[in-house]
Image (cartoon, rainbow, N blue to C red):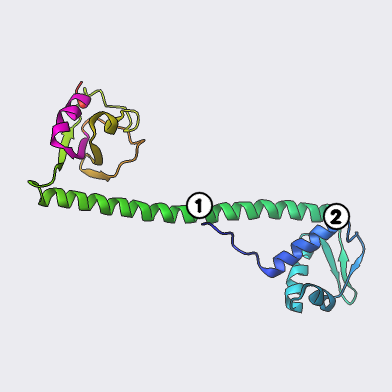
């Protein structure tokens, strides 16, 4: 489950004050309660209030007047701040989700490759007892599979054999996805029943 990162407390307070300005609870030119009172109102330390006010001061939502207090700025600035923060927050959340998904995909890819390696290893050690065998087929230049993807060729549905790897010019592509495109010279490494070999040969011929 993907969870959002919690905003810092001072940022939450800044957003709340900006929202109050945007809905006219606080109007331009109004003096906001001193930091000690705001601290009590929000239940945080004066330092947290200071950071929130400074953040709003930077974007023009308020103005900090020395020896006077915090003065409310234009409503338009508050609305602009709320809009811009929403966009930044959305992008940050999307980046966080992407990082989590990438980590999950890497883990799944590792697990798939581990299973493939186990299958290849077992197929080699139990050649005479395991009905599932490992076979290799070379795609010649005139093969009708050239340019097709694993999905569009309906490879498994037609042959009942599973492609576990592609050897392309010496580079081994483990667990190629359904959108992998066949190229001339590819060596298809598949596992399946010996009785289905003829189906593969028929599919890859010209």
Q: Position of residue 67 (x, y in %)?
A: 89, 77
Q: Which stretch appears magenta?
A: 186-203
Quarter-of-image position of residue 37: bottom right
Disc 1 on helix, strand or loop? helix
2 or 1: tag closer to the N-terminus: 2
Q: Identify whether 26 is placed above or below 135.
A: below
Image position of 196 with respect to 114: above or below: above
Q: Residues within 10 Å of mark 2 (few under 14, many from 20)?
A: few
Q: Quadrant of the C terminus?
A: top left
Q: Is residue 180 left or right of residue 92?
A: left
Q: Residue at x 75, y 66 (%)?
A: 13
Give the camera-side residue of 115 and 105: 115
According to the picture, the residue beneath numbered tag 2 turns out to be 23
Residue at 70 percent across and 55 percent down: it is 85
Residue at horizontal 59 percent and vertical 55 percent from the top: 92
Check disc 1 and report the residue beneath it. 98
In the rendered structure, does residue 191 fall within the stretch colored magenta? yes
Q: Is residue 117 magenta?
A: no
Q: Residues within 10 Å of mark 1 (few under 14, many from 20)?
A: few
> Measuring 92% from the left and 62% from the top, which residue is drawn there?
29
Q: Tell me if label 2 and label 1 are in contact, CB under 8 Å.
A: no
Q: Quadrant of residue 173?
A: top left
Residue 100 horizontal/vertical position (percent): 48, 56
Q: Secondary structure at mark 2?
A: loop
Indicate left or right for 83 with 95 as reference: right
Closer to the camera in the image, 121 or 169: 121
For the residues labelled 2 and 1, the Cα–Cα distance comes to: 34 Å
Query: Does residue 74 appear anywhere in the picture?
Result: yes
């Amino acid at each position: 489950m993907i969870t959002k990162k919690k905003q810092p407390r001072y940022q939450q307070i800044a957003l709340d004050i900006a929202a109050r300005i945007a809905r006219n609870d606080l109007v331009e030119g109004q003096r906001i309660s001193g930091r000690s009172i705001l601290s009590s109102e929000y239940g945080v330390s004066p330092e947290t209030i200071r950071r929130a006010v400074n953040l709003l001061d930077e974007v023009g939502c308020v103005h900090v007047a020395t020896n006077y207090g915090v003065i409310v700025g234009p409503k338009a600035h508050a609305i602009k701040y709320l809009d811009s923060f929403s966009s930044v927050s959305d992008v940050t959340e999307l980046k966080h989700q992407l990082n989590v998904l990438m980590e999950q995909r890497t883990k799944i890819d590792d697990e798939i490759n581990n299973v493939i390696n186990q299958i290849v290893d077992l197929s080699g050690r139990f050649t005479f007892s395991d009905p599932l065998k490992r076979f290799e087929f070379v795609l010649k230049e005139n093969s009708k599979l050239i340019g097709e993807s694993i999905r569009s060729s309906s490879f498994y549905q037609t042959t009942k054999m599973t492609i576990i790897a592609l050897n392309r010019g010496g580079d081994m592509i483990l667990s190629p996805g359904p959108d992998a495109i066949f190229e001339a010279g590819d060596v298809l490494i598949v596992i399946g029943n010996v009785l289905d070999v003829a189906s593969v040969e028929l599919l890859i011929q010209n």
